[in-house]
Image (cartoon, rainbow, N blue to C red):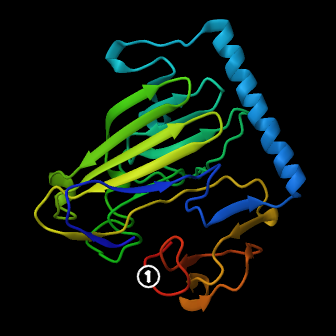
Amino acid sequence: FGRRHRSPHLAPMSAHPSIKAPFEDVGWAVKGSAEEEDEAAAAAMAKALDRAHKLRASSGRASSSEGGHSQGCASSTGEGGLETVVLRHESGATAEVYLFGATLCSYKSPDGVEHIFVSPGAIFNGAKAIRGGVPVVFPQFGQPDTAMPQHGIARTSTWAVKEIRDSAEEACLTLTLSDSAATRDKWDYAFGLEFAVSLTAVSLTMTLRVANPGPAPFDFHALLHTYFRVPDIGTTVVRGLRGRTYIDKVADGVSRVEAAAEIHLPSFTDRVYLGEAGGGAGAGAPS
């Protein structure tokens, strides 16, 4: 999403990697009958709400005012001794975010099912980007600027905790990152990023905001590069891209126009779809 951002005000950008797709018009789906999907969704919702009611009735809402954080959400230690924040909703849903890279590496729905994939070969050393999860890509996708690391500087920087909030409705975490001597050595601009994660009984919502507090405008890419844990790729389809032009990186970067309403993935697939969310075919920013 390249744009020239002159204003110091926040520019919101959202992604919903589980219940909702990264864009409202682009969706992943495991194919099945509509009745089966509706029944499964209703059962999951009922189970989550029932568990929440039981927890509230038996023990009430456990919380602590120390540091403004509740007992439902807390700092923890993840792989490689890296600091994380674990969000826990009373329905049983959980999420874990590493401060290194602001990388969300786990989201479990109330039934305990993990929806995020992290590579078994991921390295948690506080230097190399975590392979998998939901890396924050900023200010470049790929490496068009070879002087900067691939996918930018956000996913290899340590973020700060701005806020942790916990309520009966949702558990929330907000992390921030701003320019420093280390980032300016690779990308010489003032910037501010805010990454918010909201966990409820039925959804995980992530929002990335970009601010330009400096005098110089800049172009940037920004995305939440979600790795989904897919139960069966053979029954998985992608919807909402028909009519979009895409670059087929498997076919040496040839450009094509997507004709299918449902895209199947029978073999290795690596594509960049062009155009803004809700747009049609044509060149533009990658989606």
Name the quadrant of the N terminus.
Answer: bottom left
Q: Amino acid at mark 1?
A: Gly
- At x 48%, y 48%, the residue is 206
Q: Position of residue 229 (x, y in %)?
A: 67, 52
Height in image: 8 above or below 267?
A: above
Residue 244, percent from left and from top: 58, 82
**Nearer the observer, 242 or 270:** 242
Q: In the drawing, does residue 256 fall left or right of residue 220?
A: right
- Which residue is drawn at the image coordinates 59% and 9% (left, top)? 60
Q: Residues within 10 Å of mark 1 (few under 14, many from 20)?
A: some
**How many numbered tags mark residues here?**
1
Q: Position of residue 64 (x, y in %)?
A: 42, 12
193 displayed left or right of 191: right
Residue drawn at the location 16% of the way across and 55% of the way down:
213
Percent x, y for residue 76? 45, 27
Question: Residue 106 occupies which quadrant of the picture?
Answer: top right
Where 186 sits versus 14, above or below? below
Rendered residue at 50%/39% (across/down) = 198
Furthest residue toward left: 215
The vertical placement of 275 against 133, above or below, is below
Element class at badge 1: loop
What residue did someone put label 1 on?
284
